[in-house]
Amino acid sequence: MKFKSLKALALVFTVSLLSACGGSDEAPSVVDVARNDARFSVLAEAVAAADLDTTLSGEGPFTVFAPTNDAFTALLAELNVTKAQLLADKALLRSVLQYHVLGASVPKASVPLGKAITPLQGGIFKIDSVGSDLVITDGRNRTAKVVVTDVLARNGVVHAIDKVLLPANKTLVQTAQALPDFSILVEAVVAAGLVDTLNGTGPFTVFAPTNAAFAKLLTELGVTKDQLLANKTLLTQVLTYHVLPARVLKAEVPVGSPIKTVQGQNLTIDASLAITDANGRKAAITATDVLASNGVIHVIDNVILPRQ
């Protein structure tokens, strides 16, 4: 059934392209594709309400990740707003819609899998290949499937998606604060006076130790949590050793090469995503690519240490 529904959607796109041409010599724009397809009527309304018609009818080229009407219905429930309320919030609407648009034509075959993609709105999202699907992870770590690809228009290409994407609304610190397994890390960041830094523009990459990782470190060092948090000099050195001065997603990790941290010393990451610190100690990266407005978090199972 799913295969049939996707074929039907692709057919509707094809009919839309023919209708948009309407006997004119000019091929349809990316906006025309949405306007002439009933499954994208809400998107077309949103583009008009946000005053983006002229922009998206322009020369381009553009890539538009086009949410279906069902995707917008789900978003309204998620945000607890009506369609009228959403369409009336022009600032939000423009931000969300431009987050779905790239300033280049990117067909399916050219999608940079796993790497940071920057839309017109700013921020990033990423696209991974999951089985036979292309899956987008947005700035809030929500996922959307690309259900139809490579609908060509005069000024770019359209890909249909089953969920509306949203730009990031939390910094690295706020993201960690929202995850209970990083409560000790958050305490440490506060004790070291690094909150403002890690809430800053960045972008940064943070290798985030879990509470269990900190518990192992306390045993290794023979200290209590209070003693560790009270040693601001050591704490600052250790925490900044977990931070890179750039956003590095999993797909962009320079495997086997020395990676310089904000603290100044290097670490290395092997093909199995194991980190070797400056003391030859190991930490496994257990989760990757948790996106934030100013960087990315990778979860690790041991606290890494610089050379003293």
Image: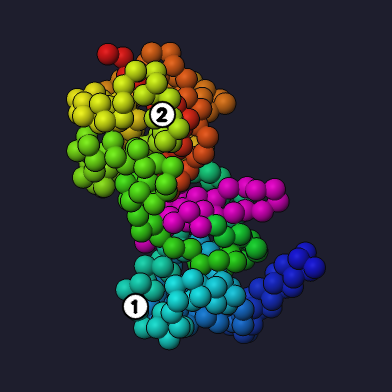
Q: Residue at x 39, y 74 (%)?
A: 93
Q: Nearer the viewer, residue 51 or 284?
A: 284
Q: Mark 1 points at which residue?
A: 90
Task: Name the dominant secondary structure of the magenta segment.
Answer: loop
Coloration mode: rainbow
* Residue depth check, mark 1 versus mark 2: number of the one nearer the observer: 2
Identify which amino acid the numbered label 1 is placed on.
Lys
The answer for how far apart the CA atoms under marks 1 and 2 are is 48 Å
Instruction: Where is residue 246? Give x, y as percent.
Output: 34, 37
Q: Quadrant of the N terminus?
A: bottom right
The part of the chain drawn in magenta is 116-142
Q: Residue at x 57, y 26 (%)?
A: 272
Mark sitting earlier along the chain (1/2)? 1
Identify which amino acid the numbered label 2 is placed on.
Ala
Residue 235 on the magenta segment: no
Q: What label sits on residue 215 in the rendered view? A: 2
Please tell me how crowded label 1 is: few (under 14), some (14-19), or many (20+) other residues with Cα within 10 Å: some
Q: Is residue 92 above or below residue 182?
A: below
Instruction: Where is residue 24? Give x, y as percent.
Output: 58, 82
Q: Is residue 89 visible?
A: yes
Q: What element carries label 1?
A: helix
Instruction: Where is residue 274? Give x, y as percent.
Output: 51, 25
Instruction: Where is residue 54? Give x, y as percent.
Output: 40, 77
Q: Is residue 275 above or below residue 36?
A: above
Whether residues under marks 1 and 2 lie with C-beta atoms below 8 angstroms apart, the answer is no
Decide if residue 4 is on the left or right side of residue 140: right
Q: What element carries label 2?
A: helix
